[in-house]
Image (spheres, rainbow, N blue to C red):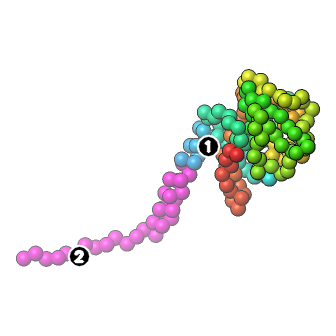
């Protein structure tokens, strides 16, 4: 005759919930740490040149490995020839071989004869800078402008000019801090 035997149940360990929580945090944190260490980095936004897209003090994640610039990307540049040597955050407007023109009367930027749709700017582009238009972007270089068109040192000025692609640190992919403003930052 068979008898049912009740197996004694082991009481849960006092810290079992904490252990499970820590395991979950490590499972999420380690891949994130790996991505930041080997494929990207974080930086803080400085200045107002990318408002309203990026605001001073926000922390960004930057993809730096295997990045090729594309029109509309928000990027970080290393420009040590400027007074403060700070990295610059700008939007890629044109690539090597592209022709840029700015109509300050209408505030419109043209690339290869086509008007750009720029809903991300703080206003129309009424400042053309001190370069001669139409401007053809030289090989190995890009043309960048800040989204705050009235307050940005960018390729419209001969002080910065077109940017050597080797000066690109990476593409801004997301804002992670402060948490209430966390979001993806995509191409236009």
Q: Which mark is residue 36?
A: 1
Q: Residue at x 69, y 59 (%)?
A: 179
158 sits to left or right of 8:
right
Residue placed most toward the observer, 35 or 124: 124
Secondary structure at badge 1 equals helix
Q: Quadrant of residue 102?
A: top right
Across and down, in percent, residue 69 comes to 68, 34
Whether residue 47 is visible to the viewer of this picture, yes or no, is: no
Considering every residue shown, the one lying at the far top of the view is 139
Q: Quadrant of residue 64?
A: top right
- Judge whether residue 117 is colored magenta: no
**Residue numbers of the magenta segment:** 1-30
Residue placed most toward the observer, 150 or 113: 113
Task: Sort mark 1 into few (<14), some (14-19) or many (20+) by Cα contacts within 10 Å.
Answer: some
Q: Is residue 33 shown above or below 3?
A: above
- Of the numbered discs 2 and 1, the one sitting upstream in the chain is 2
120 sits to left or right of 126:
left
100 sits to left or right of 71:
right
Residue placed most toward the observer, 142 or 76: 142
Q: Quadrant of the N terminus?
A: bottom left
Label 2 with label 1: CB-CB less than 8 Å: no
Q: Is residue 18 shown above or below 154?
A: below
- Judge whether residue 24 is colored magenta: yes
Secondary structure at badge 2 equals loop
40 sits to left or right of 49:
left
Front disc: 2 or 1: 1
Across and down, in percent, residue 41 comes to 66, 42
Disc 2: which residue: 6
Q: Residue at x 54, y 57 (%)?
A: 25
Across and down, in percent, residue 40 comes to 64, 40
Task: Sort mark 2 into few (<14), some (14-19) or many (20+) by Cα contacts within 10 Å.
Answer: few
């Amino acid at each position: 005759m068979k008898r049912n035997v009740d197996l004694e149940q082991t009481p849960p360990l006092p810290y079992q919930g904490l252990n499970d929580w820590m395991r979950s945090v490590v499972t999420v944190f380690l891949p994130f740490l790996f991505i930041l260490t080997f494929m990207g980095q974080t930086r803080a936004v400085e200045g107002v040149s990318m408002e309203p897209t990026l605001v001073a003090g926000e922390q960004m994640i930057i993809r730096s490995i295997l990045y090729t610039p594309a029109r509309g990307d928000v990027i970080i540049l290393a420009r040590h020839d400027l007074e403060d040597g700070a990295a610059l955050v700008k939007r890629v407007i044109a690539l090597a071989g592209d022709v840029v023109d700015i109509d300050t009367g209408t505030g419109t930027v043209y690339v290869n004869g086509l008007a750009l749709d720029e809903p991300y700017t703080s206003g129309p582009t009424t400042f053309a800078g001190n370069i001669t238009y139409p401007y053809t972007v030289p090989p190995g270089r890009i043309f960048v402008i800040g989204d705050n068109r009235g307050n940005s040192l960018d390729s419209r000025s001969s002080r910065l000019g077109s940017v050597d692609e080797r000066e690109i640190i990476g593409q801004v992919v997301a804002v992670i801090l402060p948490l209430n403003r966390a979001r993806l930052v995509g191409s236009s």
